[in-house]
Image: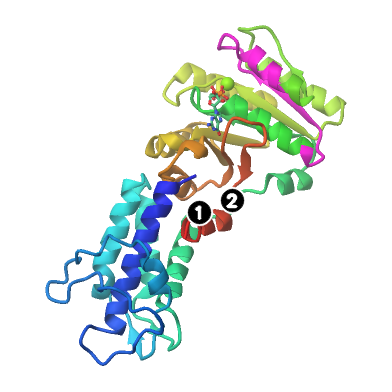
Amino acid sequence: MFGGLREKLQAARSRLGSSIQAVAAPPGAQGPEPSSPQPPLPAESPVTGEPGPDAKKPAGFVDKIKTFIIERELIVSEKDIDGALSDLEITLLECDVALPATDAIIGQVRKGLVGKHRKIGESVDSLVVNSLKTALAEVLGNGFDLTEYIRQHEKPVKILFTGVNGTGKTTTVAKIGYFLKNQGFSVVIGAGDTYRAGAIEQIGVHAERLGIKIIQHQEGADPSAVLFDTVQYASSHKIDVVLADTAGRFHNKANLMNQLEKIKRVMKPDLVVYVDEAVAGNDAVTRAFEFDKTVGADAVVLTKADMDSRGGAAISIAHTIGKPLMFLGVGQAYDDILPFEPAKVIDELLEGGI
Ligand SMILES: Nc1nc2c(ncn2[C@@H]2O[C@H](COP(=O)(O)OP(=O)(O)O)[C@@H](O)[C@H]2O)c(=O)[nH]1
Ligand SMILES: [Mg+2]
């Protein structure tokens, strides 16, 4: 998951580290000797200020940077890390991180590194990693703890899933049903996609395999009526959670969006969850934004993160639309779903693979 982004962040981390190291121990100065192996060239050439030939070759370098300890008074200035920050910016944009999220990350890293007295004894790498962690934490937000939400709300908790076609809504409904059952909640699924041929059978097969009750009508029926019945069933059988599947739709198709409005009026969901695929990158972020504007969204699930090397949508979506990321879909099996925990993602991005 997000392997490409992880690799590029490691390179950006090395570049930032070597830029700071170049200030802490400029070549030729009587600077401190790093404790163990001598780090290679600083990434910026002292003559031109341009990236040196090794600027983008971090292989094995992170470990060396890690050993570099600040041994004299040091304040990093804007120009010391300008080149490295531009690299980081390009890296993020290349990985499909949306512009506002990229700006926020760069701003936060700059704020974390520039103009502060650095403690003697601090390692350059931990300085860099901490600033990257803080920046990523800011854009990733807090996630959304569905289990806790359900515990604290009146039952049944009604969750409506929306989004465009083929992104993984139905699979996500099944996975979340499985997840919640394992957490000890009772669940009913409403087969609200009455539009696409085969959709009722598809969710029906999942429900049967998972031993979850499903409420369904005929193909072509009014989805509001199906989901109304599902809520009635949940209320009369004291079911904890209603999971409402719906047909895929685009936000600019007025009739289908009106249908969604009607579903909302009739079933009164506690949560509207927008589902999209991580692999769609910036498109997913734009669509989430549009959906949130038209029908609202309380949280987001990004599917197919297992197939996404760039990670841009996962990094950007919460920050861009201002709604938390709740789960990542990471495969086709029922347990291929991860509650979105920002700290874990940050660790995987910055620590994983080293
Ligand atoms: N690799 C992978 N495939 C997924 C994931 N979630 C859904 N899919 C696949 O995406 C396809 C479309 O899923 P579906 O749930 O029918 O999408 P819907 O049209 O939005 O309801 C199916 O082949 C799913 O198996 C995921 O997290 N990872
Ligand atoms: Mg579907």
Q: Is residue 268 visible?
A: no
Q: Quadrant of residue 85?
A: bottom left
Neighbour tally class for label 2: few under 14, some 14-19, many 20 plus, Cα within 10 Å: some
Residue located at (80% from left, 35% from top)? 240
Q: Position of residue 305 (x, y in %)?
A: 51, 39
Q: Is residue 182 above or below residue 24?
A: above
Look at the image and give the residue range highlighted in magenta: 182-206
Say what amino acid the circle numbered 2 marks. Gly
Looking at the picture, tell me which residue is in the foreground, 352 or 215: 352
**Residue beneath disc 1:** 140
Q: Is 39 placed left or right of 192 in the picture?
A: left
Residue located at (78% from left, 39% from top)? 182
In this figure, what is the number of numbered marks?
Answer: 2
Residue located at (32% from left, 49% from top)? 93
Type of colouring: rainbow
Q: Is residue 183 magenta?
A: yes
**Residue beneath disc 2:** 143
Q: Quadrant of residue 265?
A: top right
What secondary structure is marked by label 2? loop
Q: Is residue 331 magenta?
A: no
Q: Is residue 55 visible?
A: yes
Q: Position of residue 347 (x, y in %)?
A: 53, 59
Q: Quadrant of ligand 2?
A: top right
Neighbour tally class for label 1: few under 14, some 14-19, many 20 plus, Cα within 10 Å: many
Say what amino acid the circle numbered 1 marks. Leu
Q: Is residue 261 above or below residue 343?
A: above
Q: Is residue 165 above or below residue 348?
A: above
Q: Disc 2 versus disc 1: distance between alpha carbons? A: 7 Å
